[in-house]
Image (tube, coloured by chain):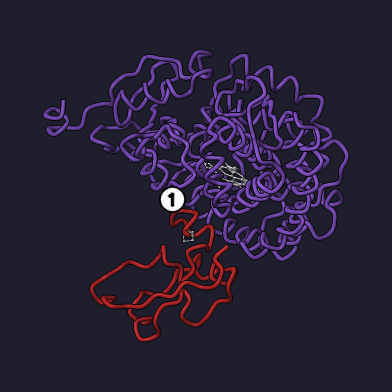
Chain colours: A red, B purple
Amino acid sequence: MAECGGNMACGTCHVYVQQSYFSRIPEPEEMEDQMLDATASARQPNSRLSCQIIITAALDGVEITCPESQI
Amino acid sequence: MAGLTKVSAAAPPVLDIDPFATRYLENPYHFHEVLRGAGPIVHIPKYDMYAVGRYAEVQSAFADWKNFSSAAGTGLGHVQKGSALRTPGPIVEADPPEHTKLRSTLNRILSPAVIRGWRDDFEAEAERRVAAIVQRGEFDAVTDLVEPFILRVLPDAMGLDDEGRENLLPIGDLTGNALGPRNDLFIESERRVEPLLPWFNSKFERAAMLPGGFGEKIWQASDTGDIETEKVMPLIRTFLRGGIDTGVSGISSMIWLLACNPEQWSALKAEPKLVRQAFDEALRLETPAQSLFRTTRGSFAFAGCQLDDDVKVMCCLAAANRDPAQWADADNYNVKRSTIGHIAFGTGIHVCIGQMVARLEGEAILAALLRHTEILEMNGPARHKLSNTARRLAALPIRVGRKAN
Ligand code: HEM
Ligand code: FES
């Protein structure tokens, strides 16, 4: 949903990233880490805020799954 | 023009108007157009300030806290010098690094998980109030529904007792006026609040916080050293000043827009899952905090113009949210629009920390209205309260009921 428009203030853009691609995304900064602890669906090892993922060639073909609930 | 600015950045064009003149406050859309039309950034001589109203520039100014500082106050008055001298607000009027640590602590105290815990209470309260009021058939949505609702749920979540809560409304009004110049609006709302100050100040005390509220959690964060003790009371004041009137404004405007646009009401009836979008779209069009200020730090080039150091910049969020360069059919209320990127909650490091609370409030009221009434119509003219920086309905006569067969 991405309600806050990428400001790391809502957690509604929570997604699960395909394991094999996960390490290709730079580590989350502290604010994102904090927000991931408070998302509507439980945080998984492959959880990220999609608003913080910069799509690069390295991510070509990645599968992203939306959790059950984002609010 | 463009040729000149390439050689060496020129000073911003002059816009010789008073944005706080009654005629602009009464017709903010006209002001927005004038501001956007005058240039990417302008100089307004009357207040020796810059002003921005196009989406691209408002967004970049808010994103750039180094050049556009909050530490000299987010109103027109410069809090570090002259007649407006005062202690800046602990979170809103702080730059990094002071801002960063406090924000991180508050993010924990007001995390989406905490806010989800309030959902049942907010929904039950909205259900109770809406069910009761639709029985009447006619009512004022601002004074009979939205104000009492917000004064119930937000102070409850904070852990404030019941006594005197209605005082928070004139205090909210002062907040909107005090961000502007010291004109009659400002002085008059200050005069109304003056006798309420002893009550208001007593509400920040630790002893005033009921257990379980986020007010108590802010106090507890001072025990662990996460928040400096002297910042606690100003912080609680910030929440009470910034979190009430904005919410009343946003929800009232949403009801107004739906009552004026029956096809949008029908669209929602058909697709009730659009409630949150309907609220955000109302915030976009009727941005509660119309303008906020920043102060330039250093002399630098911005939008092709050379800016001077230590000058106030009026950032008109409301004009940006209606900028036709950013939004198709910018002036139309459309519950199906993607509102992502609207800046009614600000953007950047100070982006509203209460935005998920506000959305929960808006969603709870609108979902209850959708359940309880088939029609939602105007029952007389709406009236706005004049304010230096707030967009706020004062009266909203509404009629509800079943469709005539
Ligand atoms: C529709 C309702 C609301 C609107 C339109 C709104 C708008 C805003 C805006 C525009 C800002 C940015 C200020 C700046 O950049 O200078 C802000 C910040 C803030 N808001 Fe809200 N707000 C709303 C509701 C709330 C609520 C319900 C709360 C409290 C529960 C709240 C607490 C705050 C706080 C503490 C900040 C300062 C954050 C910081 O400086 O890091 N707001 N709000
Ligand atoms: S869009 Fe709000 S946290 Fe990503």
Q: Please name the residue shown 76% across and 38% down the image.
A: B134
Q: Position of residue B252 (x, y in %)?
A: 64, 35
Q: Please name the residue shown 71% across and 66% down the image.
A: B224
Q: Position of residue B400 (x, y in %)?
A: 70, 34
What chain letter is assigned to the residue under label 1? Answer: B
Q: Amino acid at mark 1?
A: Ile
Residue B79: name its quadrant.
top right
- Say if disc 1 is inside 8 Å of ligand 2: yes
Task: Quarter of the image for the C terminus of chain B: give it.
Answer: top right
**Closer to us: A49 or B135:** B135
**Residue indicated by mark 1:** B340
Regarding ligand 1, which quadrant of the image does it lie in?
A: top right
Q: Please name the residue shown 65% across and 58% down the image.
A: B110
Q: Please name the residue shown 14% across and 34% down the image.
A: B6
Q: Is residue B122 left or right of residue A58?
A: right
Q: Is residue B175 left or right of residue B160?
A: left
